[in-house]
Amino acid sequence: MFIFGTAAFGLSTLAFILGWAASNHVAEARGLLKGRGAAHATMLFALLSFWAAVGYVRPHFDSVRAACREAGSSAEQFVGTLKAGDPKAAHDLLSDELRASLPAPVFSEQIQKSRQRAPQRWKDLNVIRVIPGTGLREGIAWVPGSIIHLKRQGGWKISNLDNFMKNLPGTD
């Protein structure tokens, strides 16, 4: 999204400068060149695309960034509770569907086994990056060696741990 907004802003600035230059050339030619109206139309469309970039793309980009921050804090809270050795609190951060399919005792047992096999890797576990998904209702958090899927359910909840559970530290 940022790339498209930057491109629209850059192209609109370039189009405005070119339209302005064309208008000046037509004015300096004193009737030998035609097209002053076209130059002015170019400048108008350049200004419209500039305002589209500033008025639409920027606020949308800000909402994407805010959603990523919220999802990232939920993912960091989930990973933090696991690192602290509290799988019960981490299980509470799962979505309703995932909690129903992954009972707390099974989840806790898998986490504890992994912590016993590779305690150092659990200390180094952290969220690297979060990207938004469709419609700002889903997101993906990268954790070293795996990913965590999140979705908005009131707040951000962990919605899919398949990849994370397969790649738990100490299960290689």
Image (cartoon, rainbow, N blue to C red):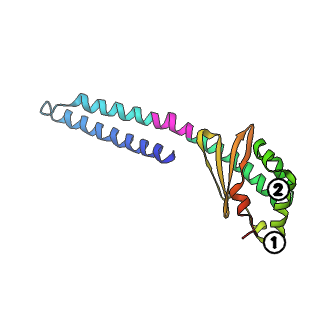
Pick the front one: 118 or 63: 118
- Residue at figure coordinates x 72%, y 53% from the top left: 161
Left or right: 16 in relation to 29: right
Seen from the viewer's position, the closer of residues 35 and 25 is 35
Q: Which mark is residue 107?
A: 2
Q: How many numbered marks appear?
A: 2
| Boundaries of the magenta span | 52-60
* Secondary element at image label 1: helix
Q: Was residue 123 drawn as part of the magenta stretch in this picture?
A: no
Q: Residues within 10 Å of mark 1 (few under 14, many from 20)?
A: some
| Residue drawn at the location 84% of the way across and 56% of the way down | 106
Q: Dot 2 surroundings within 10 Å: few (below 14), some, or many (20 or more)? A: some
Q: Quadrant of residue 128?
A: bottom right
Left or right: 107 as drawn, with respect to 16: right
Is residue 53 magenta-colored? Answer: yes
- Compare marks 2 and 1 and give the one earlier in the sequence: 2
Q: Amino acid at mark 1?
A: Arg
Q: Magenta region, mostly helix, strand or loop? A: helix
- Residue 121, picture quadrant: bottom right
Q: Which residue is mark 1?
A: 117
**Residue at x-position 65% and y-position 43%:** 138
Marks 2 and 1, how far apart at CA: 16 Å
- Residue 67 in view, yes or no: yes
Position of the C terminus by quadrant: bottom right
Q: In the image, what residue type sits under mark 2?
A: Phe
What residue sits 38% from the left and 40% below the top?
12
> Which residue in the rendered view is the most extreme toward the top?
37
Residue 163: give x, y in percent of width and height.
68, 58
| Residue 84 showing in the rendered view | no
Q: Secondary structure at mark 2?
A: helix
Query: Quick check: 94 left or right of 13?
Result: right
* Image location of residue 13, percent across then percent down: 38, 41
